[in-house]
């Protein structure tokens, strides 16, 4: 089966598993979360092989290059072969301070204890 020359961006984003549903991909286009080659994309914007697609998914921005054009949703392994992922890795997460634990049965903390606990928490 021959590949089409271009595919709708909402259909392609759904097929390569950027969004769970095609309507979610279409809504993301309307909200301006999808860009094709730097331009804001409407749902019917065509995607061609070699186009750069930037999609804001949740809190992250994913950068993809279209290697193959697909219209139907396929398995995750096949979908990964259809794109080149250029998204930089996320920054390392900062370590949270350990939880402060008081002895069981120690009773209510005194004013001095609370000041010490607030200092440890960084308040």
Image: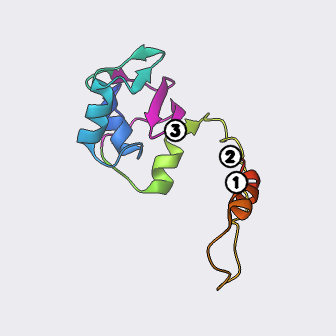
Where on the picture, by quarter, is residue 103? bottom right
Q: Is mark 1 on a helix, strand or loop?
A: helix
Q: Where is residue 66 in the image (x, y as percent from the top left)?
A: 49, 31
Quick check: 26 left or right of 121?
Answer: left
Using residue 114 as the reference point, say whether residue 78 is left or right of it. Answer: left
Disc 3 and disc 1 in contact, CB within 8 angstroms: no
In the rendered view, would you say 67 is above or below 42? below
Q: Give the range drawn in magenta.
A: 46-71
Left or right: residue 35 versus residue 44 is: right
Colour treatment of the image: rainbow
Residue 123 is marked as 2
Percent position (x, y) of residue 45? 31, 20
Q: Which residue lies furthest to the top in this view?
A: 39
Q: How crowded is mark 3: few (under 14 residues within 10 Å), some or many (20 or more)?
A: many
Quadrant of residue 105 within the rendered picture: bottom right
Q: Is mark 2 on a helix, strand or loop?
A: loop
Sequence order check, earlier mark of 3 and 1 = 3
Give me the C-alpha separation between circle 3 and circle 1: 49 Å
Q: Which mark sits nearer the N-terminus, 3 or 2?
A: 3
Which residue is nearer to you in this view: 47 or 112? 112
Magenta stretch encompasses residue 86: no
The location of residue 69, given as percent across then percent down, is 40, 35
Q: Name the residue under label 3.
A: 83
Residue projecting furthest to the front:
111
Residue at 28% x, 40% y: name it.
24
The residue most toward the bottom is 105
Residue 23 placement: quadrant: top left
Question: How many neighbours does mark 1 have within 10 angstroms: few (below 14), some (14-19), or many (20 or more)?
Answer: few
Tell me if I can see residue 8 in this picture.
no
Q: Is residue 56 visible to us here?
A: yes
Mark 2 touching mark 1, by CB under 8 A?
yes
């Amino acid at each position: 089966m021959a590949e089409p020359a271009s595919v709708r961006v909402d259909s392609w984003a759904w097929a390569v598993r950027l969004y769970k549903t095609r309507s979610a991909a279409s809504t993301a286009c309307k909200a301006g979360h999808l860009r094709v080659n730097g331009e804001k994309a409407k749902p019917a914007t065509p995607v061609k092989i070699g186009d750069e697609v930037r999609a804001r998914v949740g809190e992250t921005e994913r950068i993809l290059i279209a290697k193959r054009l697909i219209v139907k949703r396929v398995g995750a392994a096949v979908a990964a072969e259809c794109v080149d992922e250029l998204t930089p890795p996320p920054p390392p997460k900062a370590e949270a301070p350990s939880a402060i634990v008081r002895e069981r049965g120690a009773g209510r903390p005194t004013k001095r204890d609370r000041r010490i606990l607030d200092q440890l928490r960084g308040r």
